[in-house]
Amino acid sequence: MTATLIDGKAIAAALRAELAARVAGHVAQGYRKPGLAVVLVGNDPASEVYVASKAKQTKEIGMLSIEHRLPAETTEAALLALVARLNADPGVDGILVQLPLPGHIDADKIIEAIAPAKDVDGFHPVNVGRLSTGGKAFVPCTPRGSLKLIKSVRQDLSGLHAVVVGRSNIVGKPMLQLLLAENCTVTVAHSRTQDLPMVCRSADILVAAVGRPKLIDSRYVKPGAIVIDVGINRVTDKATGKSRLVGDADFDGVKEIAGALTPVPGGVGPMTIACLLENTLDGYEIRLKQGGGGGARFDPVTEWICTSGNIQP
């Protein structure tokens, strides 16, 4: 048995095409373009590549890409002031402050300063809380994309046992909430879990998000399971000295056991950016329904998130 390859590149391309059509429809009616503001502090090489890719794909679907590149010595106060300006800018529908930030800046303080209605990363406590209670909220992009990949293989997940390996706020915890909303029985495993291979082998859906190269091998996988590999790890071949990207799953071994499997690269990664664009467009469309507003005025309990129909928990 060889697993079906879940092609994240193709699925993300199809999603971007749908988003481009939605954007074009609004622009054709005379509305402004949706705007995504990305803030990069410092010159971390991985962040530079990621921000450039986001900007490229934002423009390709017809949205406005607004980039703010700040030096590493930027103060926390200056960054907070920029976030406040973006919150109040009616042309900005999504704000993403690229992580990690320099050590002298409190990342939590910055995230909490972003208006929840523009928090397209889904990291603000308001969005986290709404998601955890089953409300409407921006969902973090990697879990949202991972669920789309799972449902590309099987639409009805009700009653399936899902195991999420990793309990991070960015992937593990929101993935738990999304799978619960699909009526899965969900187990979250982590570094203190006893007999991790046994726990993983019980999963119909296995999501690996721990950042450990090839941790999940064939011993961890139930025959026929859907395996979503969120890990992106750079390893160096000792013989050649060349580096390459691998996932948290041992692809060659797992593909002989699993029913469906995402590759690394080319699986979850492309979906993360596509879902960031989808979150931004969702927020933009809600503003159009509200009369085109986009400033900082926002009541998260009674107004925007609760009344939105486009953002899926």
Image (cartoon, helix red, strand yellow):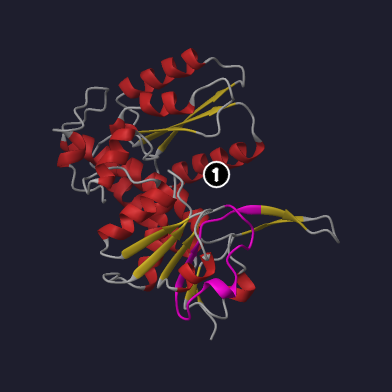
Looking at this view, name the residue that lies furthest to the right: 239
- Of residue 156 and residue 8, the one placed in the foreground of this image is 156
Residue located 34% across and 37% down the image: 34
Image-quadrant location for residue 307? top left
Residue 62 seen by the camera: yes
The correct choice, above or below, for 58 with respect to 208 in the image is above
Picture coordinates of residue 226, whole percent (x, y): 44, 72
Q: Amino acid at mark 1?
A: Ser
Looking at this view, name the residue that lies furthest to the front: 194
Q: Main secondary structure of the magenta part?
A: loop
Residue located 26% across and 23% down the image: 295
Q: Secondary structure at mark 1?
A: helix
Picture coordinates of residue 4, whole percent (x, y): 49, 77
Residue located 26% across and 70% down the image: 158
Image-quadrant location for residue 300? top left
Picture coordinates of residue 191, whole percent (x, y): 54, 53
Q: Around disc 1, counting alpha carbons within 10 Å, would you say few (fewer than 14), some (14 to 19), or many (20 or more)?
A: few
The answer to whether residue 225 is magenta is yes
The answer to whether residue 177 is magenta is no
Picture coordinates of residue 67, whole percent (x, y): 50, 29
Residue located 58% across and 52% down the image: 211
Residue under label 1: 53
Residue 274 seen by the camera: no
In this picture, which residue range is highlighted in magenta?
211-233
Q: Taking 37 as reference, is 115 left or right?
A: left
The correct choice, above or below, for 206 with respect to 67 in the image is below
Q: Taking 180 as reference, is 235 left or right?
A: right
Looking at this view, name the residue that lies furthest to the bottom: 1
